[in-house]
Image (tube, rainbow, N blue to C red):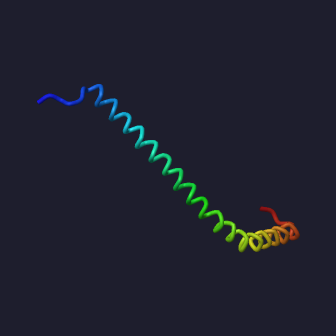
Amino acid sequence: MAQLLSDQTSSAVTSAFGQLAHTVLTNNARTLEDLVKDMLKPMLKTWLDDNLPTMVERLVRAEIERVARGGRH
């Protein structure tokens, strides 16, 4: 039975669909990454607002005490 498409045409069509699939997957991956970033930014901001000042204050106080005692690393 004869093939409907030549090898060259079949190869070109396969390549074109492969490029389309790659483009769709790449764009959707970026879109998903952007979505995750957009979701995480407010969560991270809230966490930092809630925790960073206390953490920095505690670490600075500990460093001041270490320096005041004449301690080294």
Relative placement, left or right, of 45 versus 28 is: right
Q: Which of these two is toward me, 11 or 49?
A: 11
- Work out whether 33 lies above or below 21: below
Q: Quadrant of residue 4?
A: top left
- Work out whether 42 lies above or below 27: below
Q: Which of these two is toward me, 15 or 59?
A: 15
Relative placement, left or right, of 70 versus 52 is: right
Q: Quadrant of residue 55?
A: bottom right
In which quadrant of the rendered image does the N terminus lie? top left
Identity of the residue drawn at 88% across and 69% down: 68
Percent of width and height locating residue 70: 86, 66
Percent of width and height locating residue 52: 74, 69
Q: Residue furthest front?
A: 4
Q: How many marks?
A: 0
Q: Residue furthest right?
A: 68
Percent of width and height locating residue 56: 77, 69
Relative placement, left or right, of 24 versus 38 is: left
Q: Which of these two is toward me, 54 or 27?
A: 27
- Work out whether 13 lies above or below 23: above
- Work out whether 54 lies above or below 21: below
Identity of the residue drawn at 86% across and 70% down: 69
Percent of width and height locating residue 48: 70, 68
Q: Quadrant of residue 21?
A: top left
Q: Which of these two is toward me, 34 or 56?
A: 34
Identity of the residue drawn at 31% across and 30% down: 11
Identity of the residue drawn at 60% across and 59% down: 37
In which quadrant of the rendered image does the C terminus lie? bottom right
